Amino acid sequence: MNGTLIFDGGCGFCTRSRNLLTRLDRHGRVGTVPFQEDGVEERTGLRPDQLAASVWWLDADGGRCGGAEAVNSALSAALGTRLPLLVYRLPGMGRLQEAVYRWVAANRYRFPGVTPWCQQHPAGCRPA
């Protein structure tokens, strides 16, 4: 269940969400990396436009998913329970969550957040 969440380090809402996830992760099961970090494209095999469009989850077994499934995977790992993924996989629930995720992702810069990760850690991020 361990893995890495790739998030938008230039987004205050994304950084705030990442911070909440790390607070929930009491056993260190989830790593987080901004997609702006050098080498992320090479390590993940994802194009820059894919990384910018969605959050991504890379599990310890090499699996990869994006969007709401990635959020549920990271939450499952952080909490140490598969319950978020089981709910996501209920009939119709994944489709609903993906639609909500796409809307949130498209509007993420409008939501309240914190100082974006890349402003807090500029040495770890490529310039936009």
Image (spheres, grey):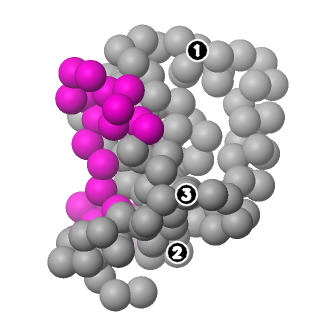
Q: Look at the image and tell me in which quarter the C terminus lies.
A: bottom left
Q: Residue at x 38, y 54 (%)?
A: 6
Q: What element carries label 2?
A: helix
Residue 56 appears in the rendering: no
Residue 122: give x, y in percent of width and height.
Answer: 26, 77
3D distance between C-alphas at marks 1 and 2 = 29 Å
Give the label on residue 99, or none: none
Give the label on residue 86, or none: 1
* Dot in front, 1 or 3: 3
* Dot in front, 3 or 2: 3
Q: What stretch is highlighted in magenta?
A: 20-46
Q: Dot 1: within a 10 Å radius of its alpha carbon, few (fewer than 14), some, or many (20 or more) residues?
A: some
Q: What element carries label 1?
A: helix
Q: Residue at x 35, y 32 (%)?
A: 23
> From what the image shows, is residue 83 above or below residue 21?
above
Q: Name the residue under label 3.
A: 113
Give whichever of 1, 25 is nearer the camera: 25
Amino acid type, residue under disc 2 in the picture: Asp
Which mark sits nearer the N-terminus, 1 or 2? Answer: 2
3D distance between C-alphas at marks 1 and 3 = 28 Å
Residue 63: give x, y in percent of width and height.
Answer: 36, 38
Q: In the displayed structure, does residue 48 sit left or right of residue 4?
A: right
Amino acid type, residue under disc 3 in the picture: Gly
Q: Quadrant of residue 113?
A: bottom right
Give the label on residue 49, or none: 2
Q: In the displayed structure, does residue 3 sit left or right of residue 84?
A: left
Q: In the displayed structure, does residue 60 sit left or right of residue 74?
A: left
Q: What element carries label 3?
A: loop
